[in-house]
């Protein structure tokens, strides 16, 4: 039982942050707060937790926020927090997609770092604009593609970079779920409601909600340049306004090929994100729902079961490991790793110094790549499933 | 431990059969002979076991054939066996693909039933012609898509037919291998040699060798009409003359969608045929390399692990089960099931009666479907990955 | 994807707590702190983090404690904290085993609730004395048998209680590890050092370190009265002073039988805690290293894979679930659940009211049962592997 | 996909054999016949297939035996076959246990080789006597502990012998089933009937039926000398006359420890034979119900999944492999391997030459070891679970 010490540590105090969205009835807001709390790197001090002002207030009270820092809307929050001496340094934006861009803009303009859920916006144009704004204002813009926080995902990326797989030939990624197999959005299920509403979700349904995660994961690990994609976006549930299943073929610039499948109508799949990457020398296989194992097969040899926390894992994975091998880590730990590494970047930004420890997290560039992916997929699908550039 | 009795049984004596191909150094010929022997339904009595006459003779001797029935070529064999009173009733054709059609034709013309390996020919045209010939001559023409012989594949098909899955929305089938990850055909590996040689294999490499198996399996279980496919055939290994990886999207007539991936360059996959089918009411999941389990998930309920031989399996699967649950069956048993059910059909044909027991095996129509699939895939790929009708 | 809301919530503010042990180089102290932090139910404010005063101070500083509340030893800490108006309400004791009893006694006498690691003491006598003291002083005494915090372990217990398994016949529990396969304690590995030292660990090695966890888990779920046990304690590594492998047979009062195996010398097992319980009507199977699945087989039916967070899980498991099915929870979440439910009990104790939500955690009675188990096992083993009462 | 050629081959013609038991309604007789047929090494020519003469005749006819060689009882068969020029060379004895010894004796005295099901007799004394008789008469006496026929079991044994695991410390073997969880023997289930009847089964129920398999497997692989065992034989199902669950602790002469659990009342286990062996250098793990994988963990390294048919398997496993990796083999193939290697021994015995290929199969010594194991277990259990020598 090798005991891993976490690298890094706090310098200069915890990061003060607030949240937009994530009030009563939300799921992902609570996840973000827990992730921020896990390594004790953040202090949660302000919020505009709902677009309904009364709900925003009730939610803030329930979470024990200082009443003066419970805001009815994000604009007010950005303005007021900017002026406080102890104002927030960062904001987590966890609203439905269509509010990401306006909220992010308000906080960027206020000089506050942004941690935004995915997809980062509802249009590529918005994402590009946010990048410009963030650069101009000098703020950090993180996007919570949380699956990149799993230790064995980090290790897989490191293996690819080190050439352990040889030249990459194939990327097979899939993300099946089953929770939208029926039209639960018709009966008031809140999570289903906004995800299937183009005015809140954007042009993509499953492609935006989970397809972008799958794409981001595959890019994070395989690191290939995509040249073209071809997408079939399908809506199986009658009356649904957005796709609930997507099949995509990918062509990479180096000649590699890929396939991506994301579905919300595949019974038996709860959250079945799975990545397989094959190169000239080896293949790897990882599943999100049992994330503490990575199958690694050097060509012609027996498959190795590389376990999180074990000596077989290199520094990139070991760095973000909290407990020894055999003591499973999960979804929240991976999410927390993003928050913790973002905190290091924010503390470094305070003083203009380098982060006290390595820092890896998806940022606005990943957000842009995700939006370009969604738009290309929608375009391809509208053209009847044709190849389009990315 | 429920003890399953095999249905059927012999009436009128074992089926006398011979073999074309399958001599020294061959793999699949020995598998066919073992499969024929397993349930004691066949008598192996004649052969033209190699295209090299000396090798044909040596192989026949090694297998203990009557010297008079060891033939230098299939034409001679067809002619001579036709004239014998105790001549073969059936022939197994297990040569490289390009010899299937001429051999099959010779035996059909001799009025001998044909059991042919897949893909059934090298062109769709040949397959259509063979069908006509077989019908005209009244012989049975079986094609050994052996994966349809697994008990849980039979059960899966029965579940789909019974409506247990509701209306089918999605078919995900894959067949990754890794044995052609390098150019072993250059160093004299016989199996690799002919499979990567267009003059012996036909226009398809991995699409013909394993893609047709995957396609056949998905069609056998899901039973949907395919309207269009789009294929990417890729050759990754430098110098190889045929595809070693194929990705295909499928559109079905009922609006369902499918994806098929077959690869021979995916390290870590030995023979990873896997089928998943999702409907409005449930999903199923089956893997060839642990074929005694079928995962079945009714929407909203816990996944069931349906085991071969258990009470959860219906009659179609139970009928072809030899040993009780927990005592694994494998590849050879599935293969043997095809042979055994073909034998029943042949015995029935002797007298013009109905088979003594149910009979299910792929035939020339499946062979034709496979060739149509290969040709459409090659056409789609040549058009740069375009949708084509099937 | 059913979104589970956590029941309970804070009333009356977070619980102020301190820690004894868990400073530099410790593993489990950091785990306790993270577990306490996860649901935001605790405030960490004081510590005597090492038995070496300078290390205690350095560790407290590193963790950002108020210098006034960094103590050189637990006695001072207990005395000083008792006198503070904002003194700690609870203490976590995470030292090697031999310090548990003296530290616990000091805090009990100070009227401070105790959260103690396992095994609770080094002798049964000490454990019984602590119970008396705690009862006399009216403090809560929790013991962190953390594996009882896993949602599916809670669900398994609920199933047994509901009679879903019928009458229990068999309990098979095992806890193999491999990290002590060689004498790493000789080369200064701190975790190995005290665990193999009788003066710090007590009379049991693997039996105390992991055997008690396995026993506690089996009792938590199966809920049977043990009448007799027979133990083989073995020391495989030359020079080691305590057992590194233990095999135990159990006889239960109702006629059921059990077997427990714990080992620290079984290569390939990182932390392989596994529980199987069989009754007249059904069997269950759970593994700690993939804790989000529970296999449940009603006699004669297909095995169900019950997943954490899914509708198949009853209220006892659902209550302690943080994220939806398919988003894996792990070791830290289970640990945190204990802390959170202990916090509820402590807050209730403040006012003499009932906890605001259900509360389940191992307490001093479990600690006593564990010590009785260790002592009986050691006694049985010394008698050459004889049956002894429990 | 490495194509494995089977070593060996026929010399001097197939082995003529007959069968005692295994008629109508029997399970294992059909398995033996199929196993004998698989590699075409045997010719089935005679039988006394039931202790009920009419049934014996009916069964022989159904199997197509020459009427002259369908016998009403084994004595007649032994006498008549001895006198035939083309008489059987070997007999398979597949009756309930109590008939093994008398039948074996009759055929040994007739100079006919014996292939006997397990447990070889109902008393150790009988087994010892059979050995003497067989040696005196110079006949081969094989015992069908068929699980030793699996390729990866052979490989595991080879690894242990080669020292890949270092010195063996621990042997954990288990064999849980669930088919006797209720008193199905009361309702005429034939398999259950004789297995729970001491007059047919002997003194052991589950210990004889499956416990001996587990013990044999562990001895085959680990190859240790057992010094003492301690057994708890339990009968859970009311009214049952023999044990349906057994827990055994083992002490080996080299200081290693073992545990064996066999049960027929553990719902969810169909035929869960599993073996784990741990040494100073590595551990291995194999399960019968997915027998094509062997988990191998060198201490401190990642676990390897060694697959049947792959290059990672040494000659002992490769020799008995029929189809390439990824094409699963199962129970019947393992069983057939025993038959095939016995055939080689029989053919060698014809001429007094060495077998044409390596030969490994359990024989009367294994049968004796099994009976000694049963008797020691029964004795230990009757003494209240005490240690007894083996």
Image: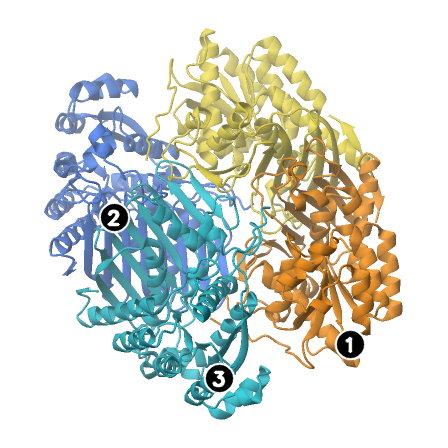
Chain colours: A cyan, B blue, C orange, D yellow
Q: Is residue B72 above or below residue B235?
A: above
* Chain that bears disc 3: A
Outermost residue on the bottom side: it is A54
The reply to whether label 1 and label 3 mark residues of one chain is: no
Between the C-alphas of marks 2 and 1, the distance is 67 Å
Q: Position of residue A269 (x, y in %)?
A: 43, 63
Q: Nearer the viewer, residue A267 or D28?
A: A267
Q: Secondary structure at mark 1?
A: helix
**Residue bearing the label numbered 1:** C349
Q: Position of residue A214 (x, y in %)?
A: 35, 62
Q: Position of residue A242 (x, y in %)?
A: 31, 76
* Chain that bears disc 1: C
Q: Nearer the viewer, residue C131 or C48?
A: C48
Whether residue C156 is visible to the viewer of this picture, yes or no, is no
Q: Is residue A17 above or below residue B372?
A: below
Whether residue B218 is visible to the viewer of this picture, yes or no, is yes
Label for residue B211?
Answer: 2
- The residue under the point 42% across, 55% down is A153
Which of label 2 and label 1 is nearer to you?
Answer: 1
Neighbor class of circle 3 (other Cα within 10 Å; few <14, some 14-19, many 20+) is many
């Amino acid at each position: 039982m090798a005991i891993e010490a976490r690298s890094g540590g706090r310098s200069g105090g915890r990061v003060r942050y607030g949240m937009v969205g994530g009030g009563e009835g939300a799921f992902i807001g609570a996840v973000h707060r827990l992730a921020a709390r896990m390594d004790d790197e953040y202090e949660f001090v302000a919020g505009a937790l709902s677009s309904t002002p009364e709900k925003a207030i009730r939610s803030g009270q329930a979470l024990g926020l200082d009443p003066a820092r419970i805001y009815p809307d994000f604009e007010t929050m950005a303005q007021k927090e900017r002026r406080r001496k102890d104002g927030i340094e960062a904001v987590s934006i966890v609203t439905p997609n269509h509010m990401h861009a306006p909220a992010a803009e308000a906080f960027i303009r206020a000089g506050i770092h942004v941690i935004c859920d995915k997809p980062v916006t509802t249009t590529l144009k918005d994402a590009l604009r946010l990048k410009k704004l963030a650069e101009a204002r000098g703020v950090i813009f993180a996007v919570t593609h949380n699956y990149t926080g799993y230790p064995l995902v980090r290790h897989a990326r490191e293996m690819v970079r080190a050439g352990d797989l040889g030249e990459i030939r194939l990327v097979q990624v899939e993300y099946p779920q089953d929770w939208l197999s029926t039209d639960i959005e018709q009966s008031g299920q809140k999570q289903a409601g906004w995800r299937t509403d183009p005015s809140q979700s954007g042009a993509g349904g499953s492609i935006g909600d989970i397809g972008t995660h799958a794409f981001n994961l595959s890019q994070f690990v395989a690191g290939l340049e995509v040249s073209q994609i071809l997408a079939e976006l399908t809506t199986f549930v009658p009356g649904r306004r957005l796709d609930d299943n997507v099949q995509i073929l990918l062509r990479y610039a180096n000649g590699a090929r890929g396939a991506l499948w994301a579905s919300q109508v595949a019974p038996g799949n709860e959250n079945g994100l799975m990545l397989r990457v094959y190169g000239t020398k080896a293949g790897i296989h990882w599943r999100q729902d049992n994330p503490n194992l990575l199958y690694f097969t050097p060509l012609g040899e027996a498959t190795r079961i590389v376990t999180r926390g074990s000596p077989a894992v290199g520094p990139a994975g070991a760095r973000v490991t909290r407990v020894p091998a055999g003591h499973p880590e999960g979804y929240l730990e991976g999410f927390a790793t993003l928050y913790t590494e973002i905190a290091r970047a924010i503390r470094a930004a305070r003083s203009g110094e380098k982060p006290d420890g390595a820092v890896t997290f998806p940022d606005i560039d990943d957000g842009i790549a995700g939006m370009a992916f969604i738009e290309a997929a929608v375009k391809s699908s509208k053209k009847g499933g044709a190849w389009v550039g990315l």
